[in-house]
Amino acid sequence: MTATLTRASDKQQVTAVICHLVKPGQERKYEQWLHEVSAVAQQFEGHSGVSFIRPTDPANPEYAIVLKFDCYKNLQNWLDSPVRRRWIDKAKPFVQQDQRIQVLTGLETWFTVPGKRGQPPPKRYKMSILTTLAVFLVSQPLSQILGPLLQFIPSLLRALILTFLTVLLLTYVIMPRVTRLFYRWLYG
């Protein structure tokens, strides 16, 4: 098992992304296992939800399990539990290789660099500084440009639209470029 576990504050929600490469022809059995093990995980303290990302390319049958817990300690209790180990053993006939686990606690999801999987996230203060600057530099021009066009919309709806556009731009356009631009400082 390969794991990148970032120790977070015990009061902060954490997300674990667990990847399995499924053997061809075993998808149905794996999905059944996936639903059963998810039901067991829900019984553990602090479980906050689970979702699945199914493969879109038959040539790369990798599934991702996105598992949320209320804090690092409770997630670790599940990951280290004998119950989970038994379920992982049950999955071995369906998977091609050991699972990969990455634990994310928040901002670092914006600071992942393609091809650098498993790299520890940057220091939190660095992520906070760059995120603050990026949000400011995106939200201000958006407000100036779109504000007058949206002035006839109720203020809460206007704020929601501007926030949505800011997050969309940050996620898909700005933060990947900021991460590449400041890579040496972030990961130095």
Image: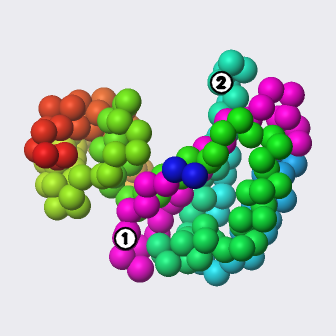
Left or right of 178, for residue 13: right
Left or right of 94, for residue 120: left
Sequence-first tag of 1 and 2: 1
Query: 10 Å neighbourhood of mark 1: few (<14), some, or many (≥20)?
Result: some
Tell me if residue 182 comes above or below residue 10 in the rendering.
above
Residue 26 located within the stretch drawn in magenta: yes
Give x and y (percent) for residue 126.
16, 55
* Label annotation for residue 60: 2
Residue 137 appears in view? no
Tell me if residue 174 comes above or below residue 101 in the rendering.
above
Look at the numbered disc 1 and give the secondary structure of its residue: loop
Amino acid carrying label 1: it is: Ala
Q: Residue at x 49, y 54 (%)?
A: 3
Residue 78: image quadrant is bottom right
The boundaries of the magenta stretch are: 3-30
Left or right of 114, for residue 130: left
Left or right of 46, for residue 116: left
* Label annotation for residue 8: 1
Mark 1 to mark 2 CA distance (whole Å): 32 Å
